[in-house]
Amino acid sequence: MVKNSILHRVSEFLVGLLFGLGLILSGMTDPSKVLGFLDLFGLWDPSLALVMGGAIAVGFFAFTLAKKRTTNFLGGLLRMPTNNQIDKPLVIGSLLFGAGWGLAGFCPGPALVSMASGQPKALVFVLAMLVGMLGFELMDRFVHAPRKAVLPSV
């Protein structure tokens, strides 16, 4: 049991390290490069489209393979999401994600990598992201959960 747990932790670390290195090499940790990609009517930098295209291709094949499996490569349980509905929380979350990405030039993964490399802007972004996550949890727990418990199911 301990040996398996250590193997999982080492593999998680190595995959995270590989992901972080990929973000650095692709330029995703440089907010000016990201903002240049989003500036369609200014000095547009299309290079991140190749990064996104590569990520979509890898994700497509990885998820196609994962759908056929019940365990991951280390033998752990593989649980795929079952909800495929586009609902109000998904749309609002997507809009907030896009607005944050467009304003700051960071999304969560690259922000964490940039913060670890000492970028002050990334630290501010990550702190704001954590405050937003905490706010969501508090609202979900104390506003939405009591309301869901009171409302009759339809």
Image: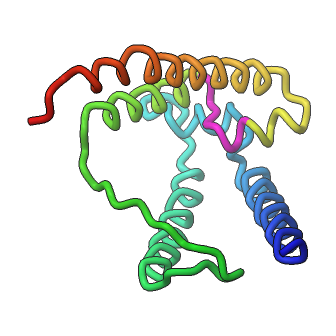
Residue 120 part of the magenta segment: no
Above or below for 14 versus 96: below
Residue 105 part of the magenta segment: yes
Residue nearest the observer in this picture, 51 or 128 = 128
The quadrant in which residue 143 appears is top left
Measuring from the top left, give residue 80's x and y in whole percent. Answer: 45, 66
Where are the magenta residues, as a range?
104-111
The quadrant of the rendering that contains the N terminus is: bottom right
Residue nearest the observer in this picture, 77 or 68 = 77
The quadrant in which residue 21 appears is bottom right
Q: In this view, does 76 lie to the left or right of 122?
A: left
Measuring from the top left, give residue 28's x and y in whole percent. Answer: 68, 45
The quadrant in which residue 129 appears is top right
Above or below for 86 versus 130: below
Residue at 83% in and 33% down: 115
Q: Residue furthest left?
A: 154
Please state the total of marks drawn on the protein image: 0
The kind of secondary structure the magenta stretch mainly shows is: helix
The quadrant of the rendering that contains the C terminus is: top left
Name the colouring of the figure. rainbow
Q: Is residue 5 left or right of residue 70?
A: right
Measuring from the top left, give residue 92's x and y in whole percent. Answer: 34, 28
Residue at 33% in and 32% down: 89
